[in-house]
Amino acid sequence: MVGFLQVHSLVQVTGAEQVRNRTASKEAGGEPRQPARASRKAAGFKGSGSLIDDAAGGQRSGGVQSIGRAFAILEEIARSREGVSLAELSKRVGLHNSTTFHLVKTMVSLGYVRQLKDKRYRVGRPLFALAASSLDDIEMVSLATPVLEDLSRETGESGHFSVRMGDCVVVIARTSGPGAFQLTDRVGVVRPAHCTALGKIVLAALRPEQLERFLQRAELKAFTPKSIVEADKLRHEIDEVRRAGLAFDDGEFDAELRCVAVPVRDFTGQVIGAIGISGPVWRLSIQALQSRAKLVQAAAARLSAEFGARELARA
């Protein structure tokens, strides 16, 4: 995959592996082992580039190893949801505390790592923005489509993947199931967030203050008698979505349709979209939707894994 997520994956080989190999070689008293040629080529390395011991040495050799070590450090920090101390971080990447400190200090100054009050380190927000900007809609569609195709085949219903667009959601990928009476919604259709399962997932991912601002400015229009048009009721509904980890649309946008949706996350754990299925009310009872929810959750975990959400991939 092109972009940051590709670099993120490659660094697991070229960054962390180089650090571990170098450390093991030094402990054995031998020369540093060169990384595999395929890994070097994949990461875009040029020349032999001997491995060195400290940050200053990395600058002398063109900074290649320092970059590898920096990404190895970012990998470990990203895995630690509660933050990681300097000592523990140094242990994980196999570097001296002083070497790790200088590398992390530089990343803190750039904003890609932040230091908490208790001295632990966590990933900084600029890194999230960098990753998000590299994952454009075309890449998301290419990753989502095969997952949706399998989901539609398994459930017999139409599959959808949507992302937030202002106060609404836009469907950027969809597939049809083998059953009769499939939906004909086109890709690119915009739907309100407050009365669709896909939209409720997006609203549930907002911070409390963001949700409150949405409730203050958005028009909670009634599309059917079942549409939620009162702020208090919608707030309660979103609380339930957060608790359950999935959302339903019981004929709230279209009286003839029912839907279920689940959040899709990226490697930071952030919700970047929603995946779901929908079908006619005479075929999809609430009980039927609930029974298919596990299939949708499995599809969400698979797609999240494509976006780098490792913990979901292992679940």
Image: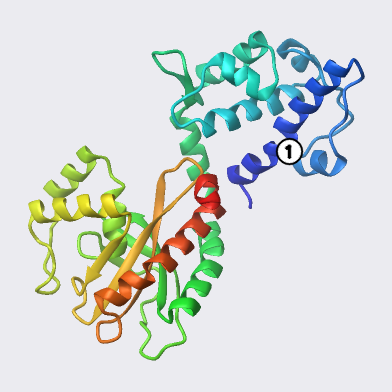
Counting from the top left corner in percent of width and height, residue 262 is at: 37, 59
Foreground: 163 or 271?
A: 271
* Residue occupying the point 41% across, 17% down: 116
| Crowd around label 1: few <14 · some 14–19 · many ≥20 (10 Å) | some
Whether residue 145 is situated above or below residue 6 in the rendered picture? below
Decide: is 160 above or below 137: below
Does residue 188 appear anywhere in the picture? yes
| Residue 294 vertical placement versus 281 (above, below) | above
Q: How many labels does the image show?
A: 1
Q: Which residue is drawn at 47% across and 18% down?
A: 120
Comparing 11 with 132, the one in front is: 11
Residue on which the image places disc 1: 13
Residue type, label 1: Val
Image position of 78 (left or right of 208): right
Q: Give the residue at the far top of this rendering.
A: 98
Residue furthest right as drawn: 30
Model colouring: rainbow
294 sits to left or right of 14? left
Is residue 172 visible in this depiction of the protein?
Answer: no
Name the residue: 80% across, 35% down.
45
- The answer to whether 237 appears left or right of 16 in the picture is left
15, 216: nearer the viewer: 15
Instruction: Name the quadrant containing residue 24.
Output: top right
Residue 27 x, y percent position in the rendering: 83, 16
User: Residue 231: where, in percent of width, then height?
Assistant: 9, 52
Closer to the camera, 220 or 196?
A: 196
Residue at x 51%, y 45% (from the top left corner): 311
**What is the secondary structure assignment of the residue under circle 1?**
helix
Q: Position of residue 76 (x, y in %)?
A: 58, 29
